Image: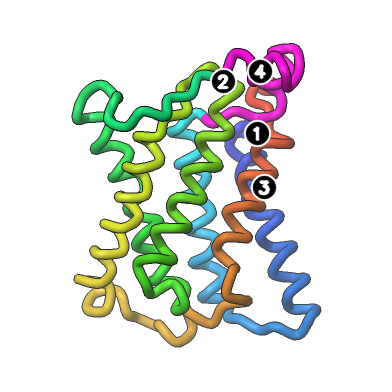
Amino acid sequence: MLMTIIPIILILGPAMAYQLVQRLCGRRTTAFHCIWTYMMMLYIRIVFYLTGTGTVWDIMDKGGLASALGEARINLMPFQSEGLFTYCTNVILFMPLGFLLPYIWKNYRNVRKTALTGLFFSALIEIAQLPTGRVADVDDLMMNTLGAILGYAAWRLIGGYFFNRKEKQRIISLGNSEPVIYIALTWSCMFLFYNWKWFI
């Protein structure tokens, strides 16, 4: 139970703190918008879980930052991954992000901004994989970004027709960079504070 609860606290806690600070600074949003942001945060947690991202504790296990980086595996040559399945799963994994960004934030209703956010999120995942012994792969960056773009395309095709309920309440955000701040906060908290070995 704790293994489920603690990551959720690490994800939702910083987002709630950020929202509280923004409200104290005079910015206003809606409960409906907040609920959707929390849903996106839970999606981000699922992505972290599925991609096996590491933490600062993995760096400590390897004897420090220098040792961890010395053992890091990085592939900068594109299209070296084995099998179509790997490419497809990376694309599918990021499609919800590409859909949720324009769905929740009006200023993300352009493909460039959504693609850059997908690239940013994917880069954070690859960085967090460096101390785990997994390969930080340029193919993952490309396919994740493509997944965000395809998710955006799906929103363009069907979002306005089937998922437009309470749109005015949903898109009242706390700032233009809100989703990037949430992604950075989530990554930072999981990377710095979460250690799955506590539960063994």
Give the structural element (helix, strand or loop) at label 2: helix
Asked whether the residues under the numbered discs 4 and 2 touch, taking CB atoms below 8 Å apart as contact, a structural biologist would say: no
Element type at marker 1? helix
Relative placement, left or right, of 119 versus 60 is: left
Q: Which residue is mark 3?
A: 9
Q: Secondary structure at mark 4?
A: helix
Q: Which residue is mark 4?
A: 68
Q: Which mark is residue 132?
A: 2
Where is residue 29? Give x, y as percent.
61, 81
In the image, what residue occupies the spot 52% across and 38% down?
125
Q: What amino acid type should be assigned to the residue bearing mark 3?
A: Ile
Q: Which residues are magenta?
A: 53-72
**Disc ID at residue 17:** none
C-alpha gap between disc 2 and disc 1: 23 Å
**Nearest-to-viewer mark from 2 and 1:** 2
Q: Earlier in the sequence, mark 4 or mark 1?
A: 1
- Where 49 sits versus 186, above or below? above
Do labels 2 and 1 touch, CB within 8 Å? no
- SS class of the residue under badge 3? helix
Q: Is residue 84 above or below residue 98?
A: above
Q: Nearer the viewer, residue 88 or 46?
A: 88
The quarter holding residue 193 reads top right
Main secondary structure of the magenta stretch: helix
- Provide residue 171's location: percent of width, then percent of height: 48, 79
